[in-house]
C-alpha cells in the first residue's frame, strides 16, 4: 500500500518516525509531508538521521519527505506536475497525524493554503480513505467548536478519526488530547483501506 503521512503543527509530530516505522514494518510504501509548523518538532534531517542506518526501498527520507517549499519546485509552467495532485494520485490512504486544531478548522472550511490542506482539498475519496489522528491541548479538544469540526469531518467527508488519549501534555497538564499510539493509527489506516476495497464503488463517497 502507498501511505501518505501528513504531519501538522502539534508537538505530537515527534511521533512521525515511529509512525513511519509502523507502516514500513508492515510492508507499506510511505511518503511524508511536514507542515511548516510541524518542523518545529521534527525536521526532515531528523528523519534522515533516524533511518539512514537501515535504508529501505519503502521509505527514503531524502526523497520521500516533502516540505512546504517543495510544492513549487516541481511546477514552473503549464503541463508540469502539481505536487499536491501527484501525491494524492500516488497514495492509497491519507493519514493526517497529528491533526492540529488549526488544520482541523482549515479542512472543515475548505481552506487549502499549504501543501497538506491542498492535498486534503483535492483528495478523491473514491480512490482511498482519509484517517486523522487529532492532537491538541485538552482545552482545545474539549472546546465545542472542535467537536463540531470533528463531526463535520466524519459526516461530510467520511474521515476516520482516531481519537486522542489521556496523557501528560506538552504544557505538563494531564488530560485528553495526546495523539493515539502510532500502532493504533496504523491499524486504523490499514483497516480503512481494506474496508474501502470491500465496499461497492457506488458507496465510497
Image (cartoon, rainbow, N blue to C red):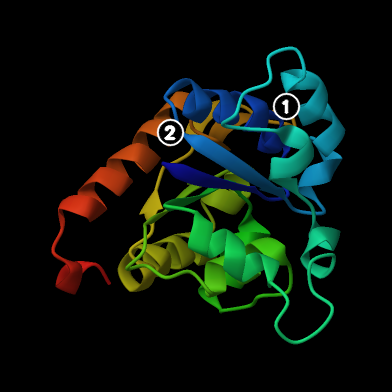
Please provide percent x and percent y for residue 169.
Answer: 66, 30
Q: Is residue 136 visible?
A: no
Q: Where 199 falls versus 111 (above or below)?
A: above
Please provide percent x and percent y for residue 124.
Answer: 42, 70
Distance (Cα) linking label 1 and label 2: 27 Å
Q: Which label was assigned to residue 109? A: none
Pick the front one: 147 or 76: 76
Mark 2 is surrounded, within 10 Å at the Cα level, by few (under 14), some (14 to 19) or many (20 or more) other residues, namely many
Residue carrying label 2? 186
Which residue corresponds to the image point at 31% horizontal and 47% vertical from the top-left? 193
Please provide percent x and percent y for residue 92.
Answer: 42, 52
Dividing the picture into quadrants, the one containing residue 73 is: bottom right
Residue carrying label 1? 172
Q: For the N terminus, give its image quadrant.
A: top left
Q: Which of marks 2 and 1 precedes in the sequence?
A: 1
Q: Where 58 falls versus 203 (above or below)?
A: above
Pick the front one: 56 or 160: 56
Q: For the C terminus, give its image quadrant.
A: bottom left
Element at badge 1? loop
Please provide percent x and percent y for residue 99.
Answer: 59, 50
Pick the front one: 201 or 146: 201
Amino acid at each position: 500500500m502507498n501511505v501518505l503521512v501528513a504531519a501538522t503543527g502539534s508537538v505530537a509530530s515527534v511521533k512521525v518516525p515511529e509512525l513511519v516505522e509502523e507502516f514500513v514494518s508492515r510492508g507499506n510504501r510511505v511518503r511524508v509531508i511536514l507542515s511548516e509548523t510541524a518542523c518545529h518538532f521534527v525536521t526532515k534531517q531528523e528523519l534522515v538521521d533516524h533511518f539512514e542506518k537501515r535504508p529501505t526501498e519503502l521509505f527514503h527520507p531524502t526523497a520521500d519527505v516533502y516540505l512546504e517549499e517543495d510544492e513549487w519546485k516541481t511546477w514552473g509552467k503549464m503541463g508540469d506536475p502539481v505536487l499536491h495532485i501527484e501525491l494524492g494520485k500516488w497514495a492509497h490512504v491519507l493519514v493526517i497525524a497529528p491533526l492540529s486544531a488549526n488544520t482541523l478548522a482549515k479542512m472543515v472550511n475548505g481552506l487549502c493554503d499549504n501543501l497538506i490542506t491542498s492535498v486534503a482539498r483535492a483528495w478523491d475519496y473514491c480512490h482511498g480513505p482519509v484517517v486523522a489522528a487529532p492532537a491538541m491541548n485538552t482545552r482545545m479538544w474539549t472546546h465545542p467548536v472542535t467537536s463540531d469540526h470533528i463531526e463535520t469531518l466524519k459526516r461530510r467527508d467520511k474521515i476516520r478519526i482516531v481519537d486522542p488519549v489521556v496523557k501528560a501534555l506538552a504544557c505538563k497538564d494531564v488530560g485528553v488530547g495526546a495523539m493515539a499510539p502510532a500502532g493504533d493509527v496504523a491499524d486504523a489506516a490499514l483497516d480503512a483501506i481494506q474496508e474501502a476495497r470491500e465496499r461497492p464503488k457506488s458507496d465510497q463517497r
